[in-house]
Amino acid sequence: MLPFNVTILGNGSAVPTSFQNPTSQLVTYGSKRFMIDCGEGTQMQMIKYKTGHKHIDHIFISHLHGDHFFGLIGIINTFHLFGRKNPLHIYAPAAVKKVIDVQLGVSLTTLRYPLVYHALEKMNNKPLYEDKNLIVSCFPLNHRIPAFGFVFKEKASDRKLKKSFVSEFNPSIEQIHAVKSGLDYETETGILISNREITDDPPAPRSYAFCSDTAYTEEILPFIKNVDLLYHEATFDNSQEHLARDKFHSTAAQAALIAQKAHAGKLLLGHFSARFKEKEHLLKEAEVVFNNSELSVEGECYEI
Ligand SMILES: [Zn+2]
């Protein structure tokens, strides 16, 4: 199986503090890496956690509140100074282009590589990114300004050939492809062997969803159903449900309710308020609703 994991670079909300950074994370799939959000200080976190800059060709920005994208111009500029040639794809609300154009314009910077913008408003129900193993799509969240969640889904892999099938029948390349795709096998004497007898099930496809920032909304459930790992914002605690509602954020318990209703494998809580240096009570409130909850930790890498 290819590596599939997420490294948390920042899990704080609103402002940087001595103990947490604004939102950013790196999803690794095989040799590819995808950045989600790029708050202020993201590059310093990358240096601190020694992630390097290589193989990052796609950056997904959930929405245009500063704590989710104020680091973007910095990383764009660093790629330029490092002599990058490959295109960098930015998936974000359309207005991000205006901001970046102004920032590059006033500093008379002509990038050495192409920036390719993909407006999220136009991408609903269409894949943002797709290769032979992975598909990334977005869906609307419920926030004060347009905001989007992201879901990374591994595609189903081919069926696994049993060794005994290969040694016994010595199939051709074409026959191997056919059997891997699920077809039955016909021997030279015309006997049909069912696919189940000569293959094993492949590993179940894995998936990851990112939901920040959002008020509690069950409208996201169809998009994140059965994900193995769900990162969901938990800006507030139970005593602040009114604040969560007013500010279009979620409590830890609401995040857990979403995880439970989505039948997620595991919940990773994040986007913590700077009010909470200690966050154990958020975890306890979530665990009451959804047992397999965890507080995200900056610098940690979570397997999907
Ligand atoms: Zn926000």
Image: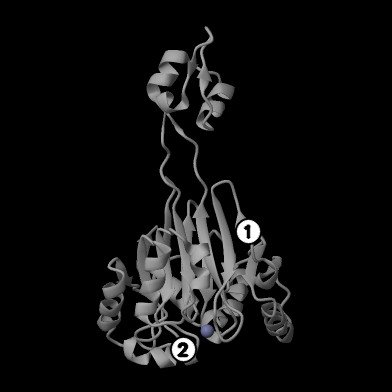
Q: Return the x and y of residue 202 as percentages of the image width and height.
A: 43, 39
The quadrant holding residue 59 is: bottom right
**Marked residue nearer the N-terminal end (1 or 2):** 1
Identity of the residue drawn at 29% across and 65% down: 292
SS at circle 2: helix
Foreground: 246 or 167? 246
Most extreme residue toward the top is 189
Three-letter code, disc 2 = Arg
**Identity of the residue drawn at 56% across and 85% down:** 65
Measured as percent of width and height from the top left, residue 18 is found at: 36, 88
Q: How many marks?
A: 2
Q: Quadrant of the N terminus?
A: top left
Q: Amino acid at mark 1?
A: Pro
The quarter of the displayed image where residue 146 is located: bottom right
Position in image of residue 157 (x %, y %): 49, 41
The answer for how far apart the CA atoms under marks 1 and 2 are is 30 Å
Mark 1 sits on what residue? 127
The answer to which of 60 and 107 lies nearer the viewer is 60
Q: Which residue is mark 2?
A: 245
Query: Disc 1 on helix, strand or loop?
Result: loop
Say which mark, if any, is on residue 136. none
- Disc 1 crowd, CA 10 A, few/some/many (<14, 14-19, 20+): few
Q: Is mark 1 within 8 Å of ligand 1?
A: no
